[in-house]
Image (cartoon, rainbow, N blue to C red):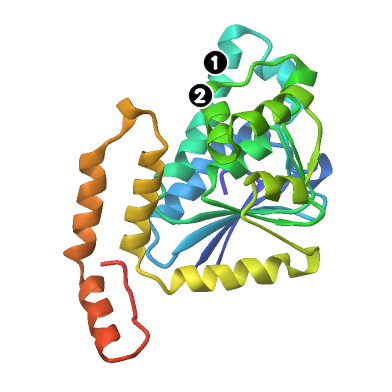
Amino acid sequence: MPSERLIAQKSGPIGWLIFNNPARRNALSVDMWEGMPVILDGYAADPQVRLVVLKGAGDKAFVAGADISQFEDQRASKAAVEHYDEMSKRALASLQRIGKPTIAMVRGFCIGGGLNVAMSCDLRIAASDARLAIPAARLGLGYAYDGVKKLVSLVGPAYAKEIYFTARQFDAAECYHMGLLNRVVEPQMLESTIESMAAAIAENAPLTIKSTKLSVDTAVAEAQARDLAAVQAAVDACFASQDYIEGRRAFMEKRKPAFRGV
């Protein structure tokens, strides 16, 4: 592992990425930010992995923000702040480029940088005890445009301003109402809900999911960043695939398709 504070485990079609810093409520340290792309790029290249689930170790937190104890060294000067921001951008970008569904399994605190990680996932499934917040206004730090845009695209400008302006913790029910969470379940049902959803996703055609993920992400991207040729190429790859043949045959034969991602 690139860091002892990150755990990578495979379970059937699921590639798990576990934030393992429970003593600090899984706060993100520098080595965790740097290790995320290593694990995620590995899952991207593994055909056995159909989706990735991110969760925090223990039941107290998904990720309770960045590790503030490192700020004096890592974010004390303009150059240090720029380096830290580039590092976190690379980690979040690896969630975008993986081409496979990503799910944030949120239990307990999901704060600041942790919420940015969760927002960078395709889906967010939370336990009813989850607490989400962006406390930037209480720390005096600036919040980068990419993160702001991501939040606005999920909850709209009015809720985004409330989240940023108040810096308070929002409960899971409030976040579901805003559209920040896809689903909220009781804590004892969280893992089984994730596994059920993962099983449903894993049965579907990987190339279709990849192209759809790219299309949705492109639809909400800045106009100048939209690569419509790449989107069309991904769609064309679906129609040229063996999975498309398998899907048609399975439909005609009234059986469940066996997709291979080729």
x and y percent of residue 44 in the render? 41, 53
Query: Crowdedness of circle 2 by 10 Å Cα count: few (<14), some, many (20+)?
Result: few
Name, please, the residue furthest toward the left.
240
Let me know if residue 12 appears in the view: no
Kind of residue at disc 1: Glu
Q: Quadrant of residue 163?
A: top right
CB atoms at circles 2 and 1 under 8 Å apart?
yes
Badge 1 is on which residue?
Answer: 82
Residue 124, relative to residue 74: is it above or below? below
Q: Nearer the viewer, residue 232 or 1?
A: 232
Kind of residue at disc 2: Glu
Q: In the image, 120: left or right of 106?
A: left
**Label 1 residue SS:** helix
Query: Crowdedness of circle 1 by 10 Å Cα count: few (<14), some, many (20+)?
Result: few
**Label 2 residue SS:** helix
Q: In the image, 50: left or right of 207?
A: right
